[in-house]
Amino acid sequence: MREDGSIHLLGRGNKCVNTAGEKVFPEEVEETAKTHPAVEDCLVFGVPDERLGQRVVAVVEARPNRSVTAVDVTQHVRSLAGYKVPRDVKLVDRVPRTAAGTWRHRLRGPLSLRPQITPRGPAHARPGRVDQGG
């Protein structure tokens, strides 16, 4: 993740995200997020984190004519273990996919992201940035 909030996807690498010694399988988080009625598609991967080793990040596309916020997504996936909940949720117009449906990890440029805000309050007691989709 770059300082301007953009992500340059080069590949998921290992399919398992190791966050604070816990193993997270992205497909489990993706499938759970996609059960939200306003989520069309989701891509989950790990990014380097000084404290955790890696942190879980989700890139989310809303269904047509539906609205979803990062808070909606994180609350929805809280049915999973806490360490599996994405610390960063990025809302995008379209999750990059190939014609075969696999995620397009080699993009011509950075994945454009909407502005982020830091959550406050008891619903988001753990640190992390959440995009409100604004």
Image (cartoon, helix red, strand yellow):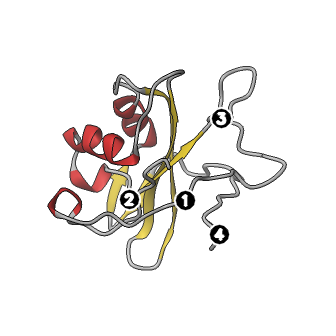
In percent of width and height, residue 129 lies at: 41, 64
| Amino acid, disc 4 | Asp
| Amino acid, disc 3 | Trp
| Amino acid, disc 2 | Arg
Q: Which residue is mark 3?
A: 103
Quarter of image, res 64 = top right
Mark closest to the chain's N terminus, 3 or 1: 3
In percent of width and height, residue 131 lies at: 45, 54
In percent of width and height, residue 113 lies at: 61, 53
Image position of 7 (left or right of 73): right
Q: Is residue 37 above or below residue 118?
A: above
Badge 3, how many Cα within 10 Å: few under 14, some, many 20+? some
Label 4 sits on a secondary structure element that is: loop
Single out the mark in the foreground, 2 or 4.
4
Work out how far the residue at label 2 is from the one at label 3, CA to CA, in angstroms.
Answer: 21 Å
Q: Residue at x 32, y 63 (%)?
A: 119
Mark closest to the chain's N terminus, 2 or 3: 2
Badge 4, how many Cα within 10 Å: few under 14, some, many 20+? few
Of residues 84 and 18, the one nearer the viewer is 84
| Amino acid, disc 1 | Pro
Q: Which residue is mark 2?
A: 87
* Residue 4, disc: 4
Mark closest to the chain's N terminus, 4 or 3: 4
Image position of 25 (left or right of 121): right
Mark closest to the chain's N terminus, 2 or 4: 4
Label 2 sits on a secondary structure element that is: loop
Q: Which residue is mark 1?
A: 115
Work out how far the residue at label 4 is from the one at label 3, CA to CA, in angstroms.
Answer: 23 Å
Q: Are marks 4 and 1 in contact (CB under 8 Å)?
A: no
Q: Residue furthest bottom?
A: 50
In percent of width and height, residue 108 lies at: 84, 48
Single out the mark in the foreground, 2 or 3.
2
